[in-house]
Amino acid sequence: MKNEFSRQDGALFLKLARQSIVSELQGKKSDLLFLKKQLSDTMKQKNRGTFVTLHKKGALRGCIGNIEPVKTISQGIIDNAKHAAFNDGRFSPLSSDELSATLIEVSILTQPIEIEYSDEMELISKLRPGIDGVTIKKGYQNATFLPQVWKQLPEPKQFLSNLCMKAGLASVEWKLGDLEVSVYQVQLFEEKE
């Protein structure tokens, strides 16, 4: 994937995500408004999906995003940061005390591309571990794993089985050939300890 955004852009995305959480915790919007004034026109486009992931002491603490570009890049980061901190149903809302021990990742997604496959081996052969994020869909059930998830689930069969379970499907559903499968890549920006 071509890196569309610079490190400086990424640093601004991370500040935007962190400040949106701080603003929510403290009820102050002025610092967030100041950051929004620094955004380039590219950051204000509605052409990319975004995810914000929170980690506390190396463990997942929240992850929310949009695969499709339903908002501008900057607004997606602002909203997804707040939702990851306070509305991820897997976790209690983030407290002020936790924020200093929490690291933020911002993922800017490419447009998903559906892949055609006829059997499980062909599906596996079309996935690029560590590069592709994967979305599956069957009826109303769907789920995605960002490319970063390959670090925890490096084997494609295990990756796909866990993705099916995340979608509420049987772990073997990916072997049956009737899922819609799409792949995308991300440009990742992350805070360091």
Image: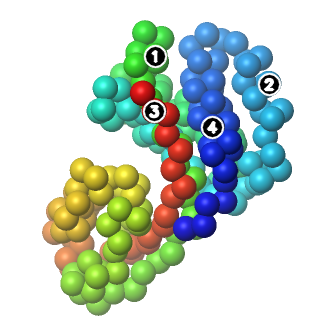
Q: Which mark is residue 146?
A: none
For residue 89, what is the image quadrant?
A: top left
Helix, strand or loop at mark 3: loop
Residue holding disc 4 = 11
Mark nearest the camera among 1 and 3 is 3
Amino acid of disc 1: Ser
Q: How much space separates mark 3 and mark 4, taking CA atoms?
A: 11 Å
Tell me: residue 120, above or below residue 44: below
For residue 170, what is the image quadrant?
A: bottom left
Among numbered discs 3 and 2, the one appearing first in the sequence: 2
Residue at image position (64%, 18%) is 23
Among numbered discs 4 and 1, the one appearing first in the sequence: 4
Percent from the top left, x then y, of residue 111? 58, 67
Q: Which mark is residue 34?
A: 2
Residue at image position (55%, 68%) is 1
User: Is residue 53 in view?
Assistant: yes
Nearest the viewer among 4 and 125 is: 4
Residue holding disc 3 = 192
Among numbered discs 2 and 1, the one appearing first in the sequence: 2
Q: Viewed as shown, does residue 192 lie left or right of 56? A: right
Q: How much space separates mark 3 and mark 2, taking CA atoms?
A: 23 Å
Among numbered discs 2 and 4, the one appearing first in the sequence: 4
Nearest the viewer among 32 and 38 is: 38
Helix, strand or loop at mark 1: loop
Mark nearest the camera among 2 and 4 is 4
Among numbered discs 1 and 3, the one appearing first in the sequence: 1
Helix, strand or loop at mark 2: helix
Amino acid of disc 3: Lys
Residue at image position (35%, 62%) is 130
Residue holding disc 1 = 100
Q: How much space separates mark 4 and mark 1, taking CA atoms?
A: 17 Å
